[in-house]
Amino acid sequence: MTAPGGSGAALVVRGLTKRYPRVLALDSVDWEVRAGEVHALVGENGAGKSTLARIVYGAAAPDGGTLELFGAPYAPRGPRDAVAAGVGLVHQHFMLVDTLTVWQNAVLGREPSRGGWIDGARARRELAEISRRFGLTLDPDARVADLSVGERQRLEIVKVLMRGARLLILDEPTAVLAPAEAEAMYATVGRLAAEGATVIVVTHRLAEVRRHADRATVLRRGAKIDTVDAKATDERELARLVVGRDPAPPRARAAREPGPVVLAVRDAREVRVGGTSRLRGVSLDVRAGEIVGIAGVEGNGQRELMEIVAGLVPFTGDVEIGGESVHRASPRAIRRLGVAHVPEDRLGAGVIPAMNVAENLLLGHEERFARAGTFDRGAIAAHARERIEAFDVRPADPDLALETLSGGNQQKVVLARETEDGPRLLLAAHPTRGVDVGAAESVHAALLAFRDAGGAVLLVSADLSEVRALADRVLVIYDGAIAAEYPRAEADEERLGLAMTGGRA
Amino acid sequence: MTLRSLGAAVLAPAASVAAALLFGALLILAIGESPLVVAEVCAKGVFGTAEGLATILFSATGLMCTGLSVAFAYRAGLFNIGAEGQVLVGAFVATLVALALPAAPALVLVPLCVVAAAIGGAFWGAIPGFLRARLGVHEVINTIMLNFLASALTGYLVVHVLREPGEMIPQTPAIPLAAHLPRLGEWTPLPAQSPANAALLVALAAALALAWILARTPFGFRVRALGLGERAARTAGLPVGATIVGAMAVAGAVAGLAGANEVLGFRYRFLDNFTGGIGFLGIAVALLGRARPGGVVIAALLFGALNAASLEIDLFTDVPREIGFVVQAAILLFVVAGDHVLRRRLAAGREG
C-alpha cells in the first residue's frame, strides 16, 4: 500500500494505550502518518478517534506507548507542548470570539506586541502571508460574528497555521458545513498537503474519506483495525471495516396515507429580546403518520423552530397542535397536548447527566409514580427495567449515572422516556448525533415505528442521508424560512444541497 | 454510593476541617501563644462539660436551620442568601402569634408558634422564589434585598409598634410562658439554665423531613432535577416555576425555625436584629455539609462547637476569640478550594 504525499513519517505511534474507568479507549494502537499526506481517521463514536487525537494534541496523557513526531520522540505534557512541536488542532466547535475581528482572533493568545501595545500591522502581515500561501482568503477586518460557518472554519485553520503547525488535526470538520462549503474545505486541505503540511481528518463521513484522503485508518472499540489506501477502497468496504459487519439494509417502510394535520405552524418567528429573530416566518404542516424532515445547514433556524413548537421560547405567528393554538403555552402544557421532544442538545436539555438512568426515565412522569405523595420505588424500578429492556439500553443498569453511558445509549434513554405516553407528535432534533452506528439504527427504527403507528414526526438533522432515509417529505430551511419542499422521491442530495445554500433547484 | 463519591462526600470535608484546624494552630503560634493550651482549654471547657455541650447544641440548632435552608434551595440550583431575613420574619411572626394568644394552653400554643415561625419564613422565602420564577430576577439579588427589608420592617414594628412599654431596648414584651419551648436541661443531664432547647429536636426532624422529601417525593425529585439540569427539567415539562417557588418556600420555612429557636426557646421575646449573621453562616454550614441534610447536621454541630470554643478561648486565654471565626472561614475556603481540586481530578479521571 503506497500513497501519494511526502516521504518519511510525520507521526509514529507505537503501542498507544489509554484506559478510562470502565473502558479501554485505546488498546495498544500502532499508527503511522506520513509527512505531507491527508490521513483520515475513521470509526464509530466511541471507537477511540477523539482519544487518539487528544493524545496527539497533548490534551490527554496515554497510559502506555510512545509517540514520535517528525522523527523525534514526542511526549507532550499539554496542548502548549503540542503547539510548540508543530501540532495544531481545529476543534469541531469553533473557539472564536464573535465580537473580535478576524485578525484579532487569529493572534489571540500570542499577540505580537511592540512597546506593550498589540502590533496590529505585524499581525495583519502574518495573516496575509498565511492566507496567500495556503489560499485561505479572509477579510482581516471582518468581525467574526459576521462570518459564515465556512469562513469561521477557515479562520480556525489560519489560527493553527499561524502558530506554526505542520501537523494539523481537523476534528469532524464538515459536521457543520453545507455540501458546497465542505468541498471548499477539502480543497483547502489539499492545498495544505501540497504545501507540505500533514493533515489528519477525524471523520465519520465515509464518502469524504474516499474522495479526499490519501489513506485512512479505521479504529473500532479502541483497536486499530487497518490502514488502507483511501482511493482504492470503496465506501462499502470501509463501512464494513468501521462497523465490523455488513451495515444493515435500509428498513422497508410501509406506504402510508398521512392522516390529519397534527402540527400546523403559520408564519412563526421566535421573539428575541434585543435582537433580530432567526426565523423569518416559517409555515409548515406535519400530519399523523408522516415524518417531515427539515434539511438545512446548521444555524438557519432549525433550533428556533423546534424551540417554539416545544414551548421553550415565545413566538409570533401561530402554532397549532391538534387544532389547539399554543401561544404562550408552557413546555408542560404543550406536552400535555401529546408532544414529545428529543432535543438537539442531549446532555444539556435531553438528560440530566448526574442523575441515574431510572431518574432520567422518570423526568416528567414523576407524578405517576407517587402514591399519597410518596414515590413507589418498586414501581419506579420496574418501570426503568421495562424501558431499558424495550430500548436495549446498555449497560442495563437503572442505577448507573447517566453520564457513564455512551452517547447512543443516552439517546435511547431519551427516546424511551419521550415515546412513553403515546404522544402524537415527536420533535426529534439531530437524533443520531454522536450516536454509534448500531444505536443509530435502533433510533431510526424507533422513529419509523412511531410513524407507522400513526405518530407525526418533525425531524431536524444536519445529516442529509438521515433526512432522506427517514422523511416522507423534506423541507429545506434556509436563512430562517422554508426555501423548498420535496416529496421523498425527489429529495436527492444535489437538490437539497443547492436549496440549503440559498440556490434554487 | 460509589467509593469515589463516598470519598468526595466525607473525606474531602474532613480533610478541609483538619487543614483549617492546623491553620488555626499555626496562627495561634504566630501570635506567640500555645495551640496546645488553647486546645486544652477548649477540651475542658467546651467538650468536657455539660455546660459546654449545651452551648454547642444551642448554637448548632440555629445553624442547622439556616444551613438546611440554604442547602435545600441549593439542591434546586438556587442560592438562598436570604436565610437571615427569613429567620427574622419567622421569629417575628412567632412572636406575634404568642403575644396574640396569651391565654392559650402550651399544648396548643407551642406547636402553633413553631408553625407560625415556619410559615413566616416560608412566606419570606417564597417572595424571591416568585420573583425569580415569574420575572427572572436573580434570587441572589432578591434575597439580599429582602434581608434589608425584613430587618427594616421588623425593626420598625418593634421600635414603634410593639416595643415593651417603658423599655429602652428595642424589644417586644415577653411572650407568655405557655409559648416557651422546653429547655433540654429539663429532661436531660444538661444544665437547666443553658439555652439548648427543644428547637434542636425540631431542627433534627426538619433535617429528616428534607432528606425524605428529596429522596422520596415527586416535589423533591423536581427540586433535584432543577438543580442538576434546569434546561433538561424545563424541556421535559417539569413545572419549573412552581418548583422554584416551592423550594424557596421550604427553604424559608426551615430558616424560620431558627427564629423559633431564638424566640420560643431562648430569648422569649423578639429583639431587634438579633440574628447576628446566623443566616450567612448557614451558607458556610450548607457548603461544608455538601447540601445534604445529614451533612448539614454534622457541619452545624462543628460550627456550633467552634462558636462555643471561641467564647471559651476569649474567657480563659490571651488568644482573641476571633480565632474561632478565622478557623470557620478557613474551613470554608478549604472546602471550596478542595472541592474544586477534587472535581477536576474526578473529571480528569473520567474523561473520554
Image (cartoon, coloured by chain):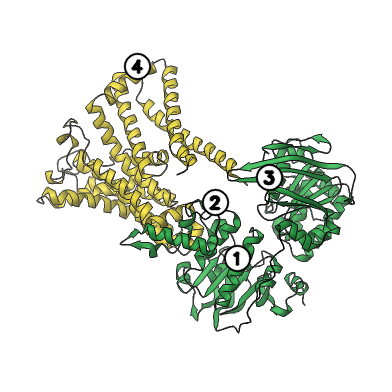
Chain colours: A green, B yellow
Circle 3 sits on which residue? A26
Which of the 4 image quadrants contains residue A85? Answer: top right
Residue located beneath label 4 in the image:
B37
Reply above or below: A166 against A240. Answer: above
Whole-Å distance between the Cαs marked 3 and 2? Answer: 20 Å
Q: Determine crowd level at label 3: few under 14, some 14-19, many 20+ residues with C-alpha closer than 10 A.
A: many
Mark 3 residue type: Leu
Mark 1 burial class by Cα count in 10 Å: few <14, some 14-19, many 20+: many
Give the CA separation, mark 1 to mark 4. 69 Å
Side (left or right) of B42 relative to A286: left
Q: Residue A39, image x and y in percent? A: 81, 51
Residue picked out by circle 1 = A443
Residue A279 vertical placement versus A114 (above, below)? below
| Quarter occupied by residue A341 | bottom right
Q: Secondary structure at mark 3?
A: strand
Q: Which chain contains the residue that carries disc 4? A: B
- Which chain hosts label 3? A
Residue annotated with mark 2:
A403
- Determine if residue A232 is in view: yes
